[in-house]
Amino acid sequence: MIKVDDLVTAHGYNGAFRVCSFSEDQGTAEIELFNVSKQQPMHYRISVPTSALSPFGEAPLPGS
């Protein structure tokens, strides 16, 4: 189960994101672009459906 502060990928978006919060009904998540190599947030936040999230590193590689 994905929790706040977990690193995730979001379907339809490129990059790694950190989960900032979930809506009260858990239907959407606010995520922030995260620079994995520098281990710091990039201060770009978006809201996406929770169903669009996958744990970082578990997404299939393109062409797989």
Image (cartoon, rainbow, N blue to C red):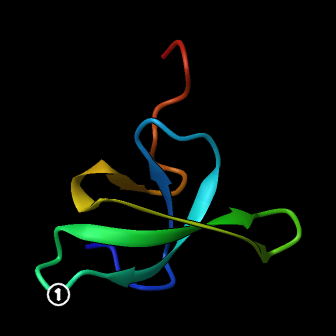
In percent of width and height, residue 4 lies at: 42, 85
Asked where in the image residue 18 lies, by quadrant, the reply is bottom right
In the displayed structure image, the side of residue 27 where residue 64 appears, left or right: right
Q: Dot 1: what SS? A: loop
In the displayed structure image, the side of residue 24 where residue 40 appears, left or right: right
Q: Residue furthest left?
A: 25
In percent of width and height, residue 60 lies at: 46, 32
Mark 1 residue type: Glu
Asked where in the image residue 42 lies, by quadrant, the reply is bottom right
Residue at point 30% right, 81% down? 22
Residue at point 49% right, 69% down? 31
Q: Residues within 10 Å of mark 1 (few under 14, many from 20)?
A: few
Instruction: Choose between 44 and 41: the one closer to the eye.
Output: 44
Instruction: From the image, tell me which residue sits under label 1.
Output: 24
42 over 54 or under it: above or below: below
In percent of width and height, residue 63 lies at: 53, 12
Picture mark count: 1
Q: Quadrant of the N terminus?
A: bottom left
Residue at point 80% right, 77% down? 40
Q: Residue furthest right?
A: 38
